[in-house]
Image: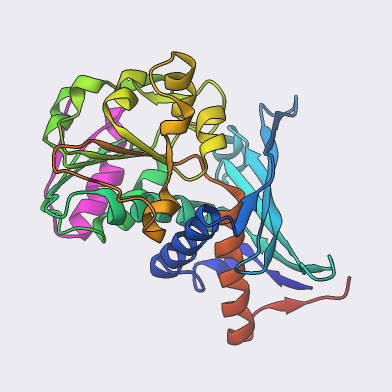
Amino acid sequence: MWIIPEREIAGLMTREAAFDAVEKVFAAMAAGDAWNFPVVREAIGHADALYGFKGGFDRAGQVLGLKAGGYWPNNLATHGIINHQSTVFLFDPDTGRPHAMVGGNLLTALRTAAASSVSIRHLARGDAKVIGMVGAGHQAAFQLRAALEQRAFEKVIGWNLHPEMLPNIAGVAAEAGLPFEAVDLPGLRDADVIVTITSSFAPSLMADHVSPGTHLACMGTDTKGKQEVEAALLARATVFADEIAQSTGIGEAQHAVAQGLIAEGAIVELGAVINGTHPGRTSDDEITLFDGTGVGLQDLAVASAVVRRAIEAGIAIEVDV
């Protein structure tokens, strides 16, 4: 079995490689060649932590495994480490033997950013110039860097519940040589693309904060009860998802479906757009919304790519099991 420690991930996985891995696995899911297993996510009754498992099998890519981990909200303050902690385990699909154990913290950040950027490439208007950010935490910087590579953006605008955190995304805009403007929520009407990345259980972005023709990548809702955007916004939009079952169960669509504003059958897998079996955006006035809940197959795809790169570079650690 190969071990790829967390410390090696930054030198092995690029945004481009993460994008390619996620795009391919979304396409495989839509083609019926890859599927996710039911998610386990539980409060463990200790350290206020949520812990769980996401797994699946990609028959097209011959990748089988799971990610174990979760959210420890006191980590940063108490232990000086990030609150999200995870490890990916891969298995040989022919024999079931362990193949690799891979540090999953940076990979989770990269694959989440890759998913929203895949949606921007396939669904945003080609002439999009202004990108808006709702959220300015640790993950927001990853999201913005990946998103900026998908269109010739000329300006970044952003809102955060705690404005003192906005320098996190202002700094990314500066890296890209773009101006940044802090706005109130109605000011997001100026955005052609909006990425939401918060941990909110109450909507911030309302339907009237979004202009016709906008593409939204809603990336923060991954648990029952969470909500970043008003359910009425989904009723105005064409809704796409990484996986429809997760979207309606733990994603943004859970609220719109429960309120009868949209039907589960109206949600489209993003992979169908990648495969060309769905047209995606059909007009410049259409609002498109990607409900990115984060599926196990994303983690397996990027972890498998890292293992290949680590073995080629001679830095993977081989152990007997």
Q: How is the image coloured?
A: rainbow
Left or right? Give the position of 163 relative to 249.
left
Q: Residue visible at 72% across and 70% down?
A: 3
- Residue closer to the observer: 206 or 268: 268
Q: Is residue 165 magenta?
A: yes
Asked if 5 appears above or below 223 in the picture, the reply is below
Asked if 142 appears above or below 235 in the picture, the reply is below
**Residue 154 at x, y = what percent?**
10, 53
Q: Residue 118 lies in what quarter of the image?
A: bottom left
State how many labels appear: 0
Q: Quadrant of the N terminus?
A: bottom right
Q: Residue 203 lies in what quarter of the image?
A: top left
**Residue 211 at x, y = what percent?**
15, 31
Q: Report the residue that reaches farthest toward the top.
A: 259
Q: Residue visible at 30% across and 51% down?
A: 279
Q: Report the residue that reaches farthest toward the right.
A: 321
- State which region is magenta: 158-184
Q: Residue visible at 42% across and 35% down?
A: 267
**Residue 257 at x, y = what percent?**
46, 21
Q: Is residue 207 magenta?
A: no
Q: Quadrant of the C terminus?
A: bottom right
Q: Residue visible at 52% across and 43% down?
A: 243
Asked if 96 appears above or below 117 in the picture, the reply is below
**Residue 133 at x, y = what percent?**
27, 39
